Amino acid sequence: MDDVTSDSSESSQEVMATKSVFVTVGTTSFDELITCMSSEATLQLLRNLGYNKLVLQIGNGRVVPESFTSASFSLIVYRFKNSLKKDLKRSDLIISHAGAGSCLEALEEGKPLVVVVNEKLMDNHQLELARQLHKEGSLFYCTCSTLLELLKSADLSSLKPFPPGKPEIFSEFLDKVMGFKK
């Protein structure tokens, strides 16, 4: 697999999708999330929920699911692109690791966001960030072990849009969550 997949090579794998999920782990490795999202149980749940396309941005992970396209579903896998903007815009649901940059990019698109916290990280500021953004109604958060249940039961339409175009609000919010400001 190439380290960077361009949009032109992706288009040959694309199916006429009407409902799409985009998963991003940023530059990190979060193999547990990629394994969970590419499992047959998750793929079946996504089909049952009306999705017909799943795009996995796997970063530096060791788990590399096989891309495929069938008559009813498409799975596209890549490591990195220069920008995730097109994938974020094309998606109907974004599932992300809890990295601040990835959360901000997803929230700016105004799409439903589910953040999956990596429980294996020490000193987990990701959990604090996810909790606070959930409390404000901007996203849902879970762990890999609770992701399928959340996808089955969450009312994605209940999420509130994050104020667009004001990264300073997010910076101030992060500073408070991290304890840099009171």
Image: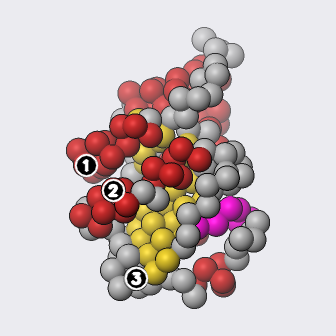
- Whether residue 178 is situated above or below residue 151 in the rendered picture: above
Q: Which residue carries the number 1 mark? A: 152
Helix or strand or loop: what does disc 2 sit on?
helix
Mark 1 or 2: in front is 2
Q: Amino acid at mark 2?
A: Ala
Question: In the image, is 78 to the left or to the right of 106?
Answer: right
Crowd tier of the residue under label 2, counting other residues whose Cα lies within 10 Å: few below 14, some 14–19, many 20 or above: few
Helix or strand or loop: what does disc 3 sit on?
loop
Q: Amino acid at mark 1?
A: Lys
Image quarter of residue 147: top left
* Res 147 visible: yes
Q: Earlier in the sequence, mark 1 or mark 3?
A: 3
Residue 124 percent coordinates (x, y): 60, 23
Q: CA distance from mark 1 to mark 3?
A: 23 Å
Q: Amino acid at mark 3?
A: Ser
- Whether residue 91 is situated above or below residue 182 in the rendered picture: below
Q: Earlier in the sequence, mark 2 or mark 3?
A: 2
* Res 158 visible: no
Q: Which residue carries the number 2 mark? A: 41
Question: In the image, is 67 to the left or to the right of 74?
Answer: right
Magenta part, dominant SS: loop
Helix or strand or loop: what does disc 1 sit on?
helix
Q: Which residue carries the number 3 mark? A: 70
- For the point 68% across and 62% down, the residue is 79
Q: Which contiguous range is marked in magenta?
A: 77-83
Image quarter of residue 77: bottom right
Mark 1 or 3: in front is 3
- For the point 51% across and 35% down, the residue is 117
Residue 83 percent coordinates (x, y): 69, 63
